[in-house]
Image (cartoon, grey):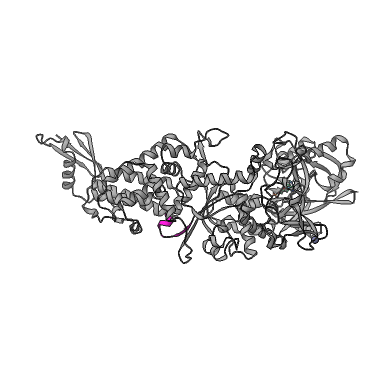
Amino acid sequence: MQYEPRVIEKKWQKFWKENRSHEPSEDSSKPKKYILSMFPYPSGDLHMGHVRNYSIGDAMARYYRKQGFNVLHPIGFDAFGMPAENAAIKHGIHPKNWTYQNIQKMTQEFETLGLSFSKDRELATCDPVYTKWEQEFFIKMWQKGLVYRKKALLNWCPNDQTVLANEQVIDNKCWRCDTPVEQKEMFQYYIKITDYADELLKDLEKLKGTWPDAVLVMQRNWIGKSSGLEFKFQLEREVDGIKDLEVFTTRADTIFGVSYCALAPEHPLVKAILPTLNAEQQEQILSIQRLNARARSMGDKIGVDLGINAIHPITKEKIPLWMASFVLHDYGSGAVMSVPAHDERDHDFALKYHLPIKKVIKNEHPFEDQGILENSLEFNGLHTKDAREAIIDFFEKQSLGRRVINFRLKDWGISRQRYWGAPIPLVHCEKCGIVPEKIENLPITLPDDVIIDGEGNPLDKHLQWQKTFCPKCSSEAKRETDTMDTFFQSSWYFLRYTTPQHLMQSVPFDFNSAKYWMAVDEYIGGIEHAVLHLLYARFFTKVLRDLGYIDLDEPFLNLLTQGMVLKDGRKMSKSVGNVVTPSEIIEEYSIDTARLFMLFAAPPVKDLEWIDLGVKGAFRFICRFFEKTDKITKTHTIPTIDHKLLAPESKEARKKVYEALQKSEDIFSKKQANFPFNTLIASCMEAFNAMNAQDDALVWTEGYFVLSHILEPIIPHVCWEISSLYFDFKNFEKISVDQEALQTEDMILIISVNGKKRSEISLPKTMSQEEIIEKAKQKAQKWLPDNLAIKKEIYVPNKLINFVI
Ligand code: ANZ
Ligand code: ZN
């Protein structure tokens, strides 16, 4: 039979669509699996990374569906965001049109890939209904005190008069006009994710073993809990009413090694002292203020002597104060006690500015945090670990300072000064201040008629849209023009999918549906989302729980971070110019080829190197697999085979077939971790080769029956075609591993004639020597002509038989 991919792919895709084969049932008594690949941004082109991501998820969804699970495997689009607005600036296309056109195109492409998505639950986060629920969440958070407004520094292009995202700042210059970017203070809305810092950290324990360790470590570091001492240095003189300087240290044990204090350029004391400094010093401080955090951390360490001393709280020594570019204004108190003898960063700075260095710990490497204290008065001789505690106790007793816990995690700034996002549903009233919109007025939708020219926020210029009435006092008021960070949308889309279409207008998601489907059993996506998306989604889940929307602590039970697709050792991407598009492969070979190659070339969690020859190999296997179906004789059910009576080659074939089945079961029951589909496919290929090396018709039939079952999740079109021709799908459920086939106690013997290897034979170890020699003789008949007598038969058990003629 000839493999004609075009014909069978069309046929089965039509069948699945018409039969709604991939829609989950609402029957919550059934065991469920929720399989989710991270939803895509609708950039318009489907790349191999997508194909990989979705093939992995699809293989899982198809397998569990076949095993009788109720499977939810949805797709949607993360549809707000900057690229749509950039397209508008560059090509004059309206962001909405650009986005929906791309969604349409990509939906089509997903369909051609044969991905078994539930169509009913598809969503786009820019849809006003989605916005409506999201705005409701925002208002509930506002009412609960989880939202606040605070001034923050943003990248500002003075030429375009617009806020720039970090990606739009290149070498500290504006991406459009090359003007040096400044830092501008503006009001921003923040969500108090820090209120949940402890729970977010603690619950990482629950994910141990089901999330990759690397991701857990990254989340832990991002949350960055550290405990230490907070205390104040008195200043030698008052500046503008400021009398002291607060610092946070995790190394109280180094208190006697402090030789200067370093302050962030934004620190209030620096601002107060600024006018007293000379012009050059002032300019140095201002120039650091203009840099964003990334530029500061990458550049040289810059310092300015502030010309004022603090008093050491214990020794009463004079400690000079410096502005330092490396001190973060938004961590701790924005000021550091610097210990150059024991901190590398402080050390570099001290060398550069000739500041004293005082050693207070005896240790081999000066920058390790362990050792015995010296030059530390009554604390001398203590180990650093104990000294830390003793010194904090001392500070607390003397009321000089206190033990505190700090988190690196910062509150989530969600304001964006852009058009293509969900409007923040707040109203500014002159009398009442900031007031949330009434729930019944949601959604607050975007106006269509805007001018998008890259100068400022288009909503700021749309006065008509801004005009509204105060929800509280009804006087004329103004809408908030900031829109929400797109991470807001991706933080709850997985909950929305749980809810059937007919309820979508009346609830954000249905409580009971969410209860049934959540948590996501398998979440699949790139490692680049290890921190932000996954942390925000975990946070959102906890907030929605506390607001009564769900009963759930953690949204994703298992996480699989798939590797990248590489070509010639580099990430496959437009900018590198090494892209192979999915449609090229589909046109030249077939959809199943693309899927098979993607899952065969590497385990899902590892990077995958694109090899043209590998794609060809995948195609050739499918062709052979399809063409050899004429060997199938008995159909519609799995044949009954008496294993003992089979020829050794047939036994070997059955063994390989059931080994593959065993592997498949081990993978999906997670006895083998991280879904190593590559080894499963290799095992199927081996089994197929073994089938080819024998000629028992029933073994062929059985082999096909089992292999099309195992391979269906990977190459569905081919397997559905084979199954529909020869088998009855219902019988797939009856397949189980034949233990007898696995337990062949066979040995492989080399057969040689006059010392020359002629053949090989596989025989049971239990067979008698006479029988073995008889079988070997039959097998080697060609080389043992009847007219020549066999002079000698040499048998070496488990190894070989040599006939001397
Ligand atoms: C003295 C010291 C001595 C420190 C030493 C470290 C090593 P984590 O663990 O991340 O919390 N620090 C405090 N506030 C800072 C800020 N706003 N910007 C930059 N650095 C700041 O880090 C806490 C340590 O980072 C603190 O402990 C402080 O330096 C510094 F051998 O104090 B340490
Ligand atoms: Zn009002």
**x 31%, y 53%: residue:** 727
Let me know if residue 568 appears in the view: yes
Give percent across and percent down for residue 364. 66, 42
Could you say which is closer to the camera, residue 663 or residue 476? 476
Image quadrant where one finds the C terminus: top left
**x 39%, y 40%: residue:** 618
Image quadrant where one finds the N terminus: top left
Q: Quadrant of residue 430?
A: bottom right
Q: Which residues are magenta?
A: 63-72
Give percent across and percent down for residue 532. 63, 50
**x 25%, y 52%: residue:** 634
Q: Quadrant of residue 788?
A: top left
| Left/right of residue 750 with respect to residue 791 in the rendered view | right
Could you say which is closer to the camera, residue 682 or residue 714? 714
Residue 158 belongs to magenta span: no
Let me know if residue 671 appears in the view: no
